[in-house]
Image (spheres, grey):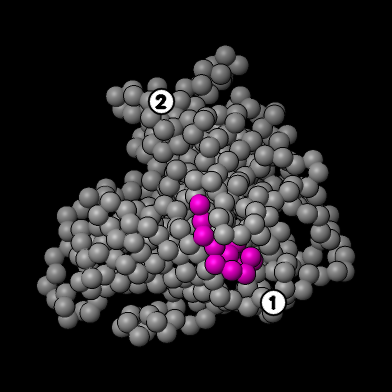
Amino acid sequence: MNSSNQITRRTMLQKAALSAAGIWVAGNSTQAESRSANEKLNIACIGLGNQGNANLGLVSSQNIVALCDVDDARTAKYAAQYPKAKTFADFRLMLDKLEKEIDAVVVTTPNHSHATIAINAMRRGKHCYCEKPLAHSIHEVREMNRVANEENVVTQMGTQNHAGENYRRTVELIQSGAIGGVKQVHVWFGRPGGWRRYKRVVDRPQESQPIPKTLNWDLWVGPAPMQNFHPCYHPHDWHYWWDFGNGTLGNMGCHYMDLIFWSLNLKYPTTVETKGPQLHPDSTPFWLDCHWQFPARESMPPVEVVWYHGRNTPQPVLDLGGPSWAAGILFVGEKGMLAADYNKRILLPEEKFVGFKPPEKTIPDAIGNQRMEWYEACKGNGKTLCHFDYAAPLTETILLGNLAFRVGQKIEWDAEKMDASNTTAAAQYVQREYRTGWTL
């Protein structure tokens, strides 16, 4: 493909969010128009760890033109599987050198670097699939959504169950009024078994550990404050340090809260308050209870959403007659309850719903997984449902839970101003300073 053809193809694939009739709408939220819906997308995968490897495999039917990871050993491993792909450690160098060749990026890095990578790529007109949570801070989330809309790129956040049969049928049940108006939801996630974080490492390690020879630690730290290398950060347990991750709520909340947001048409909460152990200012809590209050939406009443993690099935769920699952969601309606997890759902009390006939399908079955839905939308085949217009308020709600915990008081949230109206202490967590040399 010569240079002029590359530019033509790139321009064509960047015309995101055109409807089949050719009417321009929010590029972030629907689909792209392509001259050839069967043409493969040129994709760069950034971050090749466990989830990055999974995402790479799930977009491998397209043209993998670049592989980027701060660990040369990882890059070399996957380069052997994709010999036509160019390899990089620094995403900025990759985007500079291959700007005319890349149509879209898959971002699967630790939370603290999502925004810097995704925004850099989207400003160059690249479609973007980004793992959850969308970003590390509320300011970053807002900026990612703003840039996505400005550049009219096709976006998707990695909440895999959004493309699943169970979530779609559950949404239909709630929205059809099967259990009546929902005024309260309980959502819980038990203790993640086997994760090293639960060996009670809470103090930031002071000793310096040898940096693996293949790892560019400076690039891994990126915009976050520089810390000595330690296995408690890399390769996995960065989730549980505020500098790099967002704790269990940030790691799992988008998966479970997704179903609640979708079913109840939620956007921004008005208040949030939490309870959890204040063990160390640098590390996230082992367990956390979080209460969000959302206003009424059209015909839907105000609703309280309560999150619990780090323990067994919460007692309020059991008291209501909910299931003793390790993780799940309990919608409490005026006419009954609905319990759901990733792959199951049940109307409660069961005796009340004997012979219940599910509503007709209103949400089409997904064409495949979240990644396929995204890359096909980039080519004009269908649209994404977990686009950034949807994913940004969902992620912001999750991050508000952590913000309330760190501030140590109830937060009254003014979404329009992106500000906690009742305290100035929240500002430092809404937007953080970046390390010298890093910007959005």
How crowded is the residue under tag 2: few (<14 C-alpha within 10 Å), some, or many (20+)? many
Q: Which residue is mark 1?
A: 279
Provide residue 86's location: percent of width, then percent of height: 67, 36
The N terminus: image quadrant: top right
The amino acid type of the residue labelled 1 equals: Leu
How crowded is the residue under tag 1: few (<14 C-alpha within 10 Å), some, or many (20+)? few
Above or below 289: residue 43: above
Give SS at disc 2.
Answer: loop
Provide residue 349's location: percent of width, then percent of height: 23, 79
- Is residue 407 within the magenta segment? yes
Provide residue 398's location: percent of width, then percent of height: 52, 60
Which mark is drawn over residue 34?
2
Magenta-tinted stretch: 402-414
| Side of 432 where 257 appears, left or right | left
Give SS at disc 1.
Answer: loop
| Side of 53 where 31 appears, left or right | left
Mark nearest the camera among 1 and 2 is 1
Of residues 393 and 270, the one nearer the viewer is 270
Of residues 145 and 86, the one nearer the viewer is 145
> Image quarter for residue 278?
bottom right
The C terminus: image quadrant: top right
Whether residue 274 is visible, yes or no, is: yes
Q: Could you tell me which residue is drawn at 37 percent across and 61 percent down?
A: 260
Of residues 183 and 2, the one nearer the viewer is 183
| Side of 423 where 189 appears, left or right | left
Whether residue 253 is visible, yes or no, is: no
Separation of marks 1 and 2 at Cα, in angstroms = 53 Å
Q: Could you tell me which residue is drawn at 25 percent across and 57 percent down?
A: 175
Q: Looking at this view, name the residue that lies furthest to the left.
A: 355
Q: Could you tell me which residue is drawn at 21 percent across and 79 percent down?
A: 350
- Is residue 255 within the magenta segment? no
Q: Could you tell me which residue is drawn at 68 percent across and 55 percent down?
A: 428
